[in-house]
Amino acid sequence: MNNKIMAVIRREFVTRVHTKTFVITTILLPVVLLILAVAPVLLMGHSDQTTRVAVVDASGSVLGQRVQQVLAAQKLDDGAHAKPRYKVDLVRANGSTDELRKKLIGETGFSSDSAKGKYDGVLVLDKGVLDDGKLTYYGSNVSSPKAMAVLQHNLSKAFAATRLTKAGIDVATVSQAMRPVDLSAKRVAEGKLTGQSGHGAFAVAYGMGFLLYLAIILFGQQTMVSVIEEKTSRVMEVLVSSLTPFQMLMGKVLGVGSAGLLQMAIWGVSAWLITSQAPHIATLFGVDPATLSAFALPSIGGFQIVVFLLYFTLGFLLFGALFAAVGSMCNSIQETQQYASVLTMLILVGFLSVFGVIANPSGTLGSVMSWIPFFSPFVMPVRWALTSVSMFNLAGSLVLLVIGMWACVWVAARIYHTGILMFGKKPSWRELWRWIRAS
Amino acid sequence: MATPSVRMEHVIKRFSGHTAVDDLSINVPSGGIFGLLGPNGAGKTTVIRLLMGILMPDEGKVELFGTGKHGRHLAERVGYLPEERGLYKKMKVLDHLVFLGQTKGLSRADGRSRSQAWLERLGVADWADKKIEDLSKGMQQKVQFAGAMLHEPELLILDEPFSGLDPVNAQVMKDTVVDLAGQGRTIIFSTHVMEQAERMCDRIVIMARGRKVVDGPLAEVKAEAGKRHIALDFAGSRESAKAVLADRSLVASVDDFGASAELELAPGADPGQLLSALVANGVKLSRFQVVEPSLQSIFISKVGAEAAHAARVEEVA
């Protein structure tokens, strides 16, 4: 019996993997990923340069000097040989700054190799700026929120330090007090460190939900279409004479699924290769590897992978069987819409609740959803990644999911049994109920 | 006699609104060629699907090989060529056959060697590496036929095996079927082409509107209807014969071929009466012979009225 399921799986897998579409999409995604990984770095190679700033100082205090000191101390990244973030020219002004500002702006915003351009930005410190804290920066890089946030942060530091010394506090005390904290977040589950950062856990949770959603929608549809093809090409009748509906259904779902998983595995491995080998790739493209520090895949614990794979497989089988059943009821893709949309809705509810669970991992939404077989494949791995879940909850949810999956496969096989040889109009919901009860 | 290959007892199958098979009982003995005959819409395909277990009877019993079971429980012992041919269009011929063999429980290696042998035998070996969609309809049909034969079944069920084949391929198919029957296998095939059935079948069942109208060994069926049929060849104008042929007290039915005719005598009439009537009317004949009826004429006389009725029903519907 099982040999026959294997034969169906094999046929399904081989014919799928041999198509041009499969080969092209499998290769295309890593290529796109590579481009996405390398292109910003190539572009950043230009944008992450030292910003040349002219500071027009009419404040009549040490503020200008302090600003120059603080800005000049900033580096572009953490490396020992990192380039300075700013190159600052301090220009003193007596009285009105308008003339000077106009002149300097006239030398701003040209590309770096142009002889005319001396600056990327002009910062104006008017009289009284120390009190009201209002100042203006004129620059070519103002559209970058990150650059502006960094500038504002550094200026605030310079202002605070100047105000404090003006209030009579010792410079050393000020610099000691102003030292920033460095917060690193580590996730704890069940009284143990997981080795994940908070950021990493979020990425993992979201990634898992999305992966399952994508796999089910994509390969569920493929399963459905291929059942319809078997009906329209009338291969079905030959198959029916030697295979049980269960064998056909399982073979189909597992065959399409394994081809899909192969594709996803190739994508996963190439994504991992691209991110882990990023420095080498960067040097290949002539980019300084030091510039791509903050791009890495989060690490995932061993048991976490087991939980994810369990839910992924069960969820995939559950929805795959239902999609196959829908395919068996219909004779064209248009006809499937009425039924397929119900499935899509269930899948969407599951997927969207992932966001709710990410926002509040230990909330009611998450705990209720993890008991419902249609949603637990989405919700449970996310909860597992983000918060501690009791073993009882995990086991219970898995048992319900397995029962739910068998129920769906059973119902689907019933529908399949009647549906695959129906070449008339598609059944109504009432007829469908009769198919499930009878046969 | 060994246990019958197929036994159907009082089988009824209804589809929404009409009864496709109505209280049908059939026994197919083991070995030989069995013809399931009937006009379009008689229920032949439904009977075959019931045998294959693709459909379940609403009432009655179907069993194969005296096992009490039927259909895919016995898939390893049964080969099936459905009326609606269908193969995976994107698959290569040989791969497809190996897959079909696997669904019948063969190993891949075994399936491969048997497939090659069958492709050779049916004259499509050169196409083994081509995709199904590149083959002509007739060739696809041969491939599917090979698929039904791979596991060397004891019982082969063929639904309209000759339809859509050119004379050369039909001949190849016929020779193969006869050969298989010679090996002691049982072959059931459905057709509405009587000449074929007449030449090949040992036993026949004729169906009309879901019911059995004739059942038995071909020779007996013919003998039973025999001695009531007369073959005529006209030696000149047949205008003068018209009145005699239309006389229902002499002639029950006429299968008119123009220059010749085959007719069935009316009940109570004898050949002498007919001959004297023809002579009296001045009809010139080159042949007047009492013959065994052709299967075609038996079919027409048994089914004609029914078929006409069925056709009318279809028109209304």
Image (tube, coloured by chain):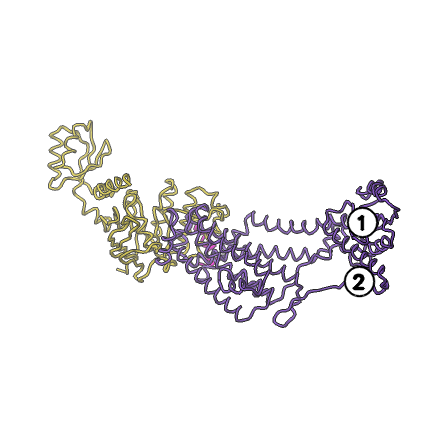
Chain colours: A purple, B yellow
Under mark 2, the amino acid is Met
Instruction: Please name the residue that numbered disc 1 is placed on.
Output: A51
Q: In this figure, what is the number of numbered marks?
A: 2
Q: Secondary structure at mark 2?
A: loop
Q: Is residue B8 above or below residue B228?
A: below
Quarter holding residue B308: top left
Q: Give a yes or no on whether discs 1 and 2 share a subunit.
A: yes
Residue A352 x/y as whole percent? 55, 56
Q: Residue furthest bottom?
A: A191
Res. B248 in view: yes
In-image side of A239 versus B24 (left or right): right
Q: Residues within 10 Å of mark 2 (few under 14, many from 20)?
A: few
In-image side of A439 versus A283 (left or right): left
Separation of residues labelled 1 and 2 (CA atoms): 24 Å
In front here: A33 or B74? A33
Q: Quadrant of the N terminus of chain A?
A: bottom left
Instruction: Please name the residue that numbered disc 2 is placed on.
Output: A178
Residue B258 x/y as whole percent? 23, 31
Quarter holding residue A378: bottom right
Region of the chain picked out in magenta, as a range = B106-118
Asked whether B158 falls inside the magenta stretch, the response is no
In front here: A7 or B142? A7
Q: Residues within 10 Å of mark 1 (few under 14, many from 20)?
A: many
Residue B243 x/y as whole percent? 15, 30
Tell me the subunit letter for badge 2: A
Would you say the residues marked 1 and 2 are in contact, meaning their CB atoms lie under 8 Å apart? no
